[in-house]
Amino acid sequence: MTIAAITYHRPATLAEACALGRQHGSDAAFLAGGTELIPDYQRERETAQHLIALDSIRELRGISEEDGLLRIGALTTIAKVAASPLVRARLPALADAARAIGSPQIRSMATIGGNFCRAVPCADTPPAAIACAARVRLAGALGARELDAEAFFTGVRKTALNPGDVLVEIVVPVQPHHSGTSYQRFARRRGPALAVAAVAARVTLEQGRITGARIVLGAVAPTPLIAARAAALIEGEPPSDALFERAGALCAEDALPISDVRGSAEYRTELVRVLARRALHEAVARAAGSAQ
Ligand SMILES: Cc1cc2nc3c(=O)[nH]c(=O)nc-3n(C[C@H](O)[C@H](O)[C@H](O)COP(=O)(O)OP(=O)(O)OC[C@H]3O[C@@H](n4cnc5c(N)ncnc54)[C@H](O)[C@@H]3O)c2cc1C
């Protein structure tokens, strides 16, 4: 595949992008920041003949809060998500996940939509968003539709997008009062490195007890994995290290890791246990300090 063989489109509106997507179907690829797509063309892993650049579509950009919902446009860069005062105040786990990605150069090009659509198991922002009960809004041939973010991920590099569909935005409810969130990941070195394992948690506290919890595991299954048993274990209980140790053990049991160059399945399982405990402690500390 050479650059000359590609037809480049630059629609100005979402409707035009969807029409082009519909017209060219699986022979089209949407271009966001290009941090994955351009290398994919170079490696001949991507062969679509029509490249549809999304960068002129204003409604895909920006972060806003309205009616109890935080809306993050798919084309918002990872750097903007990491630095956003709204995201940092409302969803610190998501800001932390964004800050963990790549290098400043990568973060300034890469988008949150691309991080979702690429759907690699070690992507950082999806687990943090899912822990906060995010939903995704899609546009395409079937019109607009919205689904829970966890249902967006259907396998390794597989999503609920149909050919020609555009991910428009990620919508996250403002978290309940006295809630705290955390994103903990382990990589083999400081600086740009993919997560070997990650855990995101959201905890709600009332009168010294945990009244709501969501725990999501990253990089240890084909898709982000909701650790429902661990969340059920801690709900209704006062937070304690012993409780979080047991919750971490359940998370480790539920993980479905593989062995690869970054770590063995056994190592990842042990990481999940430790990261889950850390995430729960930080989420509780943030909930206790929450002014909401
Ligand atoms: C050196 C390096 C380090 C990295 N480190 C990390 C890391 O630590 N953690 C991490 O999670 N990721 C990491 N990444 C991966 C990458 O930067 C992210 O996945 C990035 O967020 C992808 O976004 P993008 O805008 O560049 O997507 P693109 O490359 O433009 O697109 C990626 C895919 O998503 C599709 N797509 C993009 N936007 C949309 C949309 N709105 N609707 C429909 N389809 C769409 C494209 O067609 C393509 O298939 C790294 C990448 C590099 C090169």
Image (tube, helix red, strand yellow):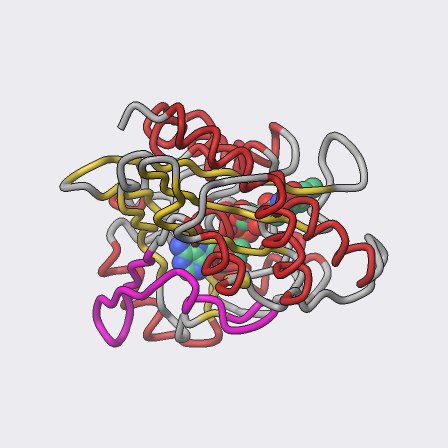
| Front residue of 19 and 2 | 19
Q: Residue at position x 39%, y 42% from top?
A: 209
Residue 157: x and y, percent? 58, 67
Q: Residue at position x 39%, y 60% from top?
A: 149
In the rendered structure, does residue 261 fall within the stretch colored magenta? no
The quadrant of the rendering that contains the C terminus is: top left
Q: Which residues are magenta?
A: 135-158
Residue 281 appears in view: yes
Residue 52 appears in view: no
Residue 185: x and y, percent? 65, 42
Residue 71: x and y, percent? 27, 43
The quadrant of the rendering that contains the N terminus is: bottom right
Q: Is residue 104 left or right of residue 18?
A: right
Q: Quadrant of residue 204?
A: top left
Residue closest to the far left: 67
Q: Residue at position x 73%, y 61% from top?
A: 43
Q: Is residue 110 above or below residue 115?
A: above
Residue 138: x and y, percent? 30, 63
Q: Is residue 122 left or right of residue 182?
A: right
In the rendered structure, does residue 150 fall within the stretch colored magenta? yes
Q: Quadrant of residue 48?
A: bottom right
Q: Main secondary structure of the magenta part?
A: strand
Q: Residue at position x 85%, y 56% from top?
A: 261
